[in-house]
Image (spheres, grey):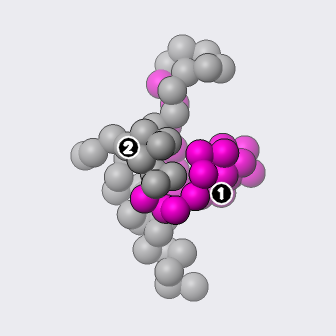
Amino acid sequence: MKIMSTMEVAKALGVRRGTLAVWRWRRRGPRWQKLPGGRSSAVYYLQADVEEWLAQKTKR
């Protein structure tokens, strides 16, 4: 289980970090997690979740 930062996911998907933030707000994009600690805590993604989301996007 590999944990990916927002920067890593943005680079892998070819989008900006801000795009990922908008997707999170709109409940789109890969599943994400937030570390405990309030509003400004770090967001991270599991590589398997990113790969699964990408695979489903390419099936359409």
Q: Give the range drawn in magenta.
A: 12-35
What x and y, as percent, mark residue 22? 71, 48
Instruction: Name the outermost residue toward the top.
Output: 37
Q: Residue at point 54% right, 75% down?
A: 57
Residue 59 lies, in percent from the top left, at 50, 84
Viewer-side label of 1, 2: 2
Q: Where is residue 54 in the image (x, y as percent from the top left)?
A: 47, 69
User: On the picture, is 34 further left or further right than 4?
Assistant: right
Instruction: Point out the residue furthest to the bottom here.
Output: 60
Tell me residue 25's x, y (percent).
Answer: 72, 44
Q: Residues within 10 Å of mark 1 (few under 14, many from 20)?
A: few
Residue lying at 59% horizontally and 45% vertically, measured from the top left: 17
| Amino acid type of the residue that numbered disc 1 sits on in the rendered structure | Arg
Quadrant assignment for the C terminus: bottom right
Q: What element carries label 1?
A: loop
Q: Does the magenta stretch include residue 21?
A: yes
Residue 60 tag number: none
Depth order, front residue of 16/45: 16
Q: What label does residue 4 carry, if any?
A: 2
In the foreground, 40 or 52: 40
| Mark 2 Cα-neighbour bin, 10 Å: few <14, some 14–19, many ≥20 | some
Q: Name the residue under label 1.
A: 28
Residue at horizontal 34%, vertical 56%? 48
Q: What is the spatial separation of the Cα atoms under label 1 and label 2, in whole angstroms?
A: 17 Å
Q: Can residue 45 be seen by looking at this rendering?
A: no
| Sequence-earlier tag: 1 or 2 | 2
- Does 5 sit above or below residue 48? above
Q: Indicate whether residue 38 is drawn in magenta.
A: no
